[in-house]
Image (cartoon, grey):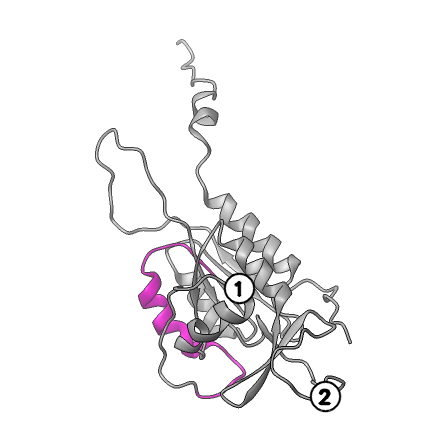
Amino acid sequence: MAAKEPAEETPTEETGRPARDGSASPPGASPSPEKPLLMVDIDGVISLFVGFAGHAPWATGPAGPDGCRYETIDGIPHCLSRTAAAHLLELTAEFEPVWASGWEEKAEENLPRLLGLPAGLPFLRFERSPGRGNAHWKLAAIDEHAGSRPLAWIDDAFNDSCHAWARARPAPTLLVQTVPEHGLTSREASRLTTWAQSLAPPPAAARDSRAPEVTPRR
């Protein structure tokens, strides 16, 4: 059965404070801002939590009717969403993606060849997860990798610790939660794109065209 995008709004969390990295540009230098980071979970974002009934006999690689590619990876069946992969490819125009998943190096080993995603993306290593149900066990590795850079994080399992961490970061931070049966859809992708574009400084031409301030005579 085809997976339909949910109608309800997906919860998000963001902060808009500027980064405080203590850096300064030389006089007269033009700033060259980096893209914000995009921390990407896999299970519940790209690998959907759906039943496999109706897709027997099991085989590696058939394109399912719901836009999934059905694969067995290390003995575990996965419904890999082609739709989510397409949205992630589009988001690379605004973000630098980083795999933030218990898949670790297996993301690089499997997802580029199976879904046509970019090869060579960085991935984070974690202490072993205490189990599914929340994503707070990723915080230390994400915080260390990101430093003071703006970041968005897309995951299906945020908890209060994740939201508190996002609010406390000095750099702009956005959490976008997916519905694990649907993963990364157009709604989440649009939210991420709008947020990333809001961080970009206005073009030089637009800045130059602003009317100069006029000091009133006394």
Q: Locate residue 64 relative to residue 77 in the image: left or right.
A: right
Question: At which x and y percent is residue 32?
Answer: 34, 40
Question: At which x and y percent is residue 196?
Answer: 50, 49
Q: Is residue 104 above or below residue 192?
A: below
Q: Number of marks in the image?
A: 2
Residues drawn in magenta: 130-152
Q: Is residue 171 above or below residue 74?
A: above
Question: Is residue 104 among the parts visible in the rendering?
Answer: no
Q: Locate residue 197 relative to residue 1 in the image: left or right.
A: left
Does 57 lie within the magenta span?
Answer: no
Name the quadrant containing residue 88. Answer: bottom right
Q: Which residue is mark 1?
A: 116
Question: At which x and y percent is residue 184?
Answer: 60, 65
Amino acid at circle 1: Gly
In this orientation, which residue lies closer to the viewer: 100 or 21?
100
Name the quadrant containing residue 142. Answer: bottom left
User: Gap between marks 1 and 2, in whole Å?
Assistant: 25 Å
Question: At which x and y percent is residue 189?
Answer: 59, 57
Secondary element under disc 2, as helix, strand or loop, is loop
Amino acid at circle 2: Ala
Q: Locate residue 25 relative to residue 10 in the image: left or right.
A: left
Q: Which residue is mark 2?
A: 56
In percent of the image, x 53 and y 50: which residue is there?
195
Q: Which mark is residue 16?
A: none
Question: Is residue 83 among the parts visible in the rendering?
Answer: yes
